[in-house]
Image (tube, coloured by chain):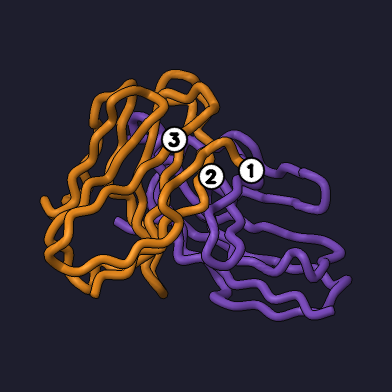
Chain colours: A purple, B orange
């Protein structure tokens, strides 16, 4: 079953504004991760939040996790044009072995200068 | 630079050709992965190797044949591909099972076009 569906599919904001992306998933997880991908390149790991954590910060990134709703959000504060990229959530399911991740379709973020 | 390299970066091949994609990681990881990324679709996990052993084959057609000679190298051998196989092929690595740490490090990808 597909995990990690992001919402919205595309988001366009002005530099300096905050960007919020949401992710929903279907089964119980060990952890949830967020990745960033610049056009046509590989993915870069941003942040990991474990199932027993509710909120985590890293620089301008803030991630929340609500396991009762099976949802997560990624907030990028004070966005910059360089934040323009696709953002993916990925879940590491409880039934997984070997760290297999299931990725969502991603949110395309465009930050206009 | 993530410590994972992929070659070639771009590949154009005919349906009757045989080619190979190469991935190398310099991170000391024990798990390696192949993903396919097509336009407008989520990343599709193809294969997983842990400690050189294949632990996942996600119903991938036999025209894709992986090879993992050691924990640092991963290949994807391609033969008699179809145009719908055109995509970005991404390699990733992670520390591996039992470490409690599963973030993956991705290479830049190989853009494959099948003509």
The image's mark for residue B64 is none
Task: Give the camera-side residue of B24 and A61.
Answer: B24
Closer-to-camera residue (A25/B26): B26
Label of residue A32 in the image: 2
Q: Earlier in the sequence, mark 1 or mark 3?
A: 1
Of the 4 image quadrants, the one containing the N terminus of chain A is bottom left
Q: Is residue A46 left or right of residue B105?
A: right
**Horizontal and vertical percent position of residue A101:** 41, 44
Identify residue for label 1.
Answer: B1
Which quarter of the rendered picture does the C terminus of chain A lie within? bottom right
Marks 1 and 3, how far apart at CA: 13 Å
Q: Nearer the viewer, residue B32 or B80?
A: B80
- Residue depicted at 66% across the width and 42% down the height: A54
- The chain identifier of the residue carrying mark 2 reads A
| Quadrant of residue B88 within the rendered picture | bottom left
Q: Is residue A9 left or right of residue B92?
A: right
* x then y, percent, for residue A94: 39, 35
Dot 1 and dot 3 within a common chain: yes
Q: Circle 2 — which element?
A: strand
């Amino acid at each position: 079953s597909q995990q990690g569906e992001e919402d919205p599919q595309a988001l366009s904001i002005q530099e300096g504004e905050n960007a919020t992306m949401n992710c929903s998933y279907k089964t119980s997880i060990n952890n949830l991760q967020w990745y960033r991908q610049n056009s046509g390149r590989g993915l870069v790991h941003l942040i990991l939040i474990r199932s027993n954590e509710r909120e985590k910060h890293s620089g301008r990134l803030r991630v929340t996790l609500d396991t009762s709703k099976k949802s997560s959000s990624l907030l990028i504060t004070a966005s910059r044009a360089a934040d323009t990229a696709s953002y993916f959530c990925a879940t590491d399911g409880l039934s997984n072995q070997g760290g297999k991740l299931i990725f969502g379709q991603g949110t395309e973020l465009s930050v206009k200068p | 630079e993530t410590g994972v390299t992929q070659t070639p970066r771009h590949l154009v091949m005919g349906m009757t050709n045989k080619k190979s994609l190469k991935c190398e990681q310099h991170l000391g990881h024990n798990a390696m992965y192949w993903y396919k990324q097509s336009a407008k679709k989520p990343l599709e996990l193809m294969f997983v190797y842990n400690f050189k052993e294949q632990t996942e084959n996600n119903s991938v057609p036999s025209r894709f044949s992986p090879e993992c000679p050691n924990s640092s190298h991963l290949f994807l051998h391609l033969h008699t591909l179809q145009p719908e196989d055109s995509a970005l092929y991404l390699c990733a690595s992670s520390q591996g099972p039992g470490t409690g740490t599963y973030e993956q490090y991705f290479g830049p990808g190989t853009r494959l076009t099948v003509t």
